[in-house]
Amino acid sequence: MSIPPELLDLLRCPKTGQRLVLAPLHLLEQLEAKRCAGTLVVDAPQPQWNSGGPLEAVLVREDGQVGYPVQGGIPILLPDHGFKLAPHP
């Protein structure tokens, strides 16, 4: 999955305004394994994406703390739809 660089430059985290980058393959594989195991946690009471389908890509916040799913080529940038990726310092 590829997002055109000019679009990626415009995308920001809906909570913090930080830049977003595409997750590297190893992180995408880890998140997909968690999704398959049912341990990928999203704060949204009713996710607006197909959490039963595979993750095609994830946009990671600049600080590495949160990732947002991309499904059908569309980034799901809703504030409560981020995955926690790392513990807060």
Image (tube, rainbow, N blue to C red):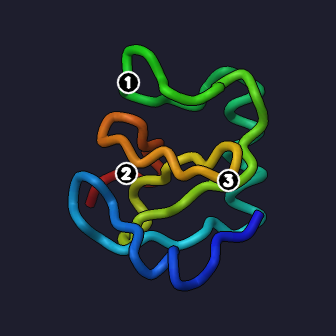
Compared to 33, does 14 lie above or below?
Answer: below
Nearer to us: label 3 or label 2? 3
Q: Of 54 and 28, which appears nearest the observer? A: 54
Neighbourhood count class around disc 3 (C-alpha, 10 Å): few under 14, some 14–19, many 20 upward = few
Q: Quadrant of residue 57?
A: bottom right
Q: Of 66 and 88, which appears nearest the observer? A: 66
| Distance between the alpha carbons at the discs numbered 3 and 1 | 20 Å
Disc 3 or 1, which lies upstream in sequence? Answer: 1
Which residue is tagged 1? 44
Q: Of 83 and 13, which appears nearest the observer? A: 13
Q: Position of residue 80 (x, y in %)?
A: 33, 34
Left or right position of 65 against 88: right
Compared to 80, does 64 lie above or below?
Answer: below
Q: Which mark is residue 81?
A: none
Which residue is tagged 3? 73
Compared to 39, does 57 lie above or below?
Answer: below
Residue located 76% across and 29% down the image: 53
Name the residue type under label 1.
Ala
Disc 3 or 2, which lies upstream in sequence? Answer: 3
Q: Quadrant of residue 2?
A: bottom right
Residue located 37% across and 27% down the image: 43
| Distance between the alpha carbons at the discs numbered 3 and 2 | 28 Å
